[in-house]
Image: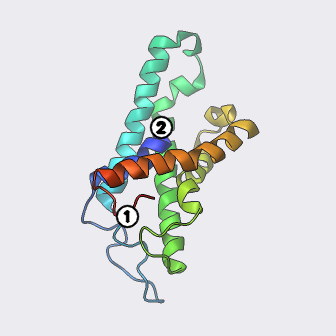
C-alpha cells in the first residue's frame, strides 16, 4: 500500500522546483523534466510512509496475532523504504523516457510498473525479512492488477485536473 499511495499522491503536491534543477545532459535533453519536482517527490514519500504507519496501527489494533511479526516492528521504516523505492522507480522511468524522446505524459508499459519494481527492489535490499511475504504468485498478481489500479488513479487525477492526461 505505501508504494501505491506514494506513487499516486505525488501529483497532489505539485511544485515548481524540478528534481533535475532544469539541467540538461550533453544530448541537450532535460535529465528528468518538469514533471518530477522536489515537492511531489517529498510529498509522495511522506504520504507513502504515513500509509505504512497507518498499516502498523491497523495491524496492531485488529491483527494482534501478528503483533510480533517483524513487519509490524519495522512497518514505518518499511513504509519509508517501499515509498522511496516507488518514487525512485518513477524517477528512473522518467529519465529513460527523456532519453527515448518520449514526452512528459507519453505512455509506455514501464510507466505503469516502474514504481512497483522500484519498491520491490528497494524492499528486498533494505527490508528483506519483511519482503518474504512476496512469493511468485503475489508478484504475478501485482503485475496484473497494478496497471488497472494505476489507470484508475490517473483517471481520477485527470478528472480532478491534477494531470494533463488520463494515463
Examine the image and state in which quarter residue 103 appears: bottom left
Q: Residues within 10 Å of mark 2 (few under 14, many from 20)?
A: many
State how many labels appear: 2
Specify the label residue 36 is tagged with: 1
Seen in the picture, residue 38 relative to 73 is either above or below; the reply is below
Q: Residues within 10 Å of mark 1 (few under 14, many from 20)?
A: many
Q: Position of residue 157 (x, y in %)?
A: 35, 51
User: From this viewpoint, is residue 84 visible?
Assistant: no
Q: Nearer the viewer, residue 157 or 76?
A: 157
Residue that extends furthest to the right in the rendered view of this protein = 136
Q: Report the residue at 44% width, 50% height from top.
A: 7
Q: Where is the C terminus found, in terms of image quarters? A: bottom left
Examine the image and state in which quarter residue 158 appears: bottom left
Q: Image check: 28 left or right of 93?
A: left
Q: Image check: 161 left or right of 113?
A: left
Seen in the picture, residue 35 relative to 61 is either above or below; the reply is below
Q: Position of residue 53 (x, y in %)?
A: 41, 29
Q: Nearer the viewer, residue 19 or 33?
A: 33
Instruction: Describe the element under mark 2 as helix, strand or loop.
Output: helix
Measure the alpha-carbon separation of dots 1 and 2: 21 Å
Q: Report the residue at 46% width, 46% height from top.
A: 152
Residue that extends furthest to the bottom in the rendered view of this protein = 27
Residue picked out by circle 2: 79
Q: Report the residue at 51% width, 73% height from top.
A: 97
Instruction: Describe the element under mark 1 as helix, strand or loop.
Output: loop
Disc with the residue nearer the chain's start (1 vs 2): 1
Q: Position of residue 64 (x, y in %)?
A: 53, 10
Q: Are marks 1 and 2 in contact (CB under 8 Å)?
A: no
Q: Nearer the viewer, residue 31 or 108?
A: 108
User: From this viewpoint, is residue 150 visible?
Assistant: yes
Which-is-in-front pick, marks 1 and 2? 1
Amino acid at each position: 500500500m505505501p508504494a501505491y499511495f506514494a506513487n499516486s499522491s505525488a501529483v497532489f503536491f505539485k511544485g515548481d522546483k524540478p528534481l533535475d534543477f532544469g539541467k540538461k545532459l550533453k544530448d541537450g535533453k532535460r535529465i528528468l523534466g518538469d514533471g518530477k519536482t522536489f515537492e511531489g517527490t517529498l510529498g509522495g514519500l511522506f504520504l507513502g510512509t504515513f500509509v505504512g504507519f497507518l498499516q502498523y496501527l491497523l495491524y496492531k489494533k485488529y491483527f494482534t496475532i501478528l503483533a510480533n511479526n517483524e513487519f509490524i516492528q519495522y512497518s514505518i521504516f518499511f513504509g519509508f523504504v517501499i515509498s522511496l523505492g516507488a518514487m525512485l522507480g518513477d524517477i528512473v522511468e522518467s529519465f529513460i523516457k527523456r532519453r527515448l524522446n518520449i514526452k512528459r505524459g507519453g505512455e509506455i508499459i514501464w510507466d505503469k510498473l516502474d514504481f512497483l519494481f522500484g519498491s520491490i527492489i528497494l524492499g528486498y535490499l533494505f527490508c528483506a525479512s519483511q519482503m518474504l511475504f512476496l512469493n511468485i504468485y503475489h508478484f504475478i498478481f501485482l503485475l496484473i492488477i497494478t496497471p488497472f489500479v494505476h489507470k484508475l488513479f490517473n483517471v481520477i487525477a485527470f478528472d480532478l485536473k491534477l494531470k494533463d492526461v488520463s494515463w
